[in-house]
Image: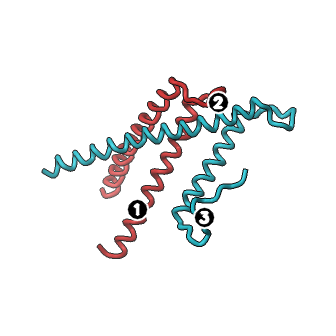
Chain colours: A cyan, B red
Amino acid sequence: MSVPLPPGAGLENIDSEQIKTFKDFLISYNKLTEMCFNDCVSDFTSRSIKHAEDKCALNCLEKFLKVNQRISQRFQEFQVLANENALASIKQTGS
Amino acid sequence: MSVKEQQNLQLIQELEIEMMADMYNRMTAACHKKCIPPVYNDSEIAKGEAVCIDRCVAKFLEIHERIGKKLGQLSMQDESLLKK
């Protein structure tokens, strides 16, 4: 797989923010590969990737993304709630 | 606020964001490990797995908060002991 370049890849105008996003992407890409490989591939009697292994790895990828999305949703909900509570307690002590 | 103070404030804010991201990544890894069995017959999240993830996130954040409070208490105690 070719490494996808960060969005808007004119090399002169990449800021540190984009580099960081790109780095995060690469890190999760590597983690994902490691995890799905470990969970899906354990037979080394053949050089080629079996259909089941391929399917397992792709399912693993898709599921991983969905799980991440769900965790991020729940996290955001928690953050909103925590913010509201903090604001409310400030108002209470302030007035 | 002096330039030095502003710089320090920015450093502290950046550190806070970085630590938040680190906590988030650890939570993601932990909840994935605890809730998703390594059998990928399907790419959908199963009902039970979804419930597990929701609870896992809530619990992780609550534990994070509790430990933070306790750590705060302990370090306050230590400081007041040192002053004595």
Mark 3 touching mark 2, by CB under 8 A? no
Q: Quadrant of residue A35?
A: top right
Q: What residue do we see at 40% from left, 43% from top?
A: A76
The amino acid marked with disc number 3 is Ala
Q: Residue B19: percent from the left, percent from the top?
A: 47, 53
Q: What residue do we see at 63% from left, 38% from top?
A: A61
Query: Dot 2: within a 10 Å radius of its alpha carbon, few (fewer than 14), some, or many (20 or more) residues?
Result: some
* Badge 1: chain ID: B
Residue B44 vs B17, above or below: the answer is above
Left or right of A33? Residue B35 is left
The amino acid marked with disc number 1 is Ile
Q: Which residue is mark 2?
A: B38
Q: Quadrant of residue B60?
A: top left
Q: Which residue is mark 3?
A: A9
Q: What residue do we see at 31% from left, 47% from top?
A: A83
The amino acid marked with disc number 2 is Pro
- Disc 3 is placed on an element classified as loop
Q: Residue furthest left?
A: A95
Q: Residue B22: percent from the left, percent from the top?
A: 50, 50
* Badge 3: chain ID: A
Q: Residue A3: percent from the left, percent from the top?
A: 68, 55
Q: Which residue is mark 1?
A: B12
Instruction: Answer yes or no: are tags 3 and 2 on the same subunit.
Output: no
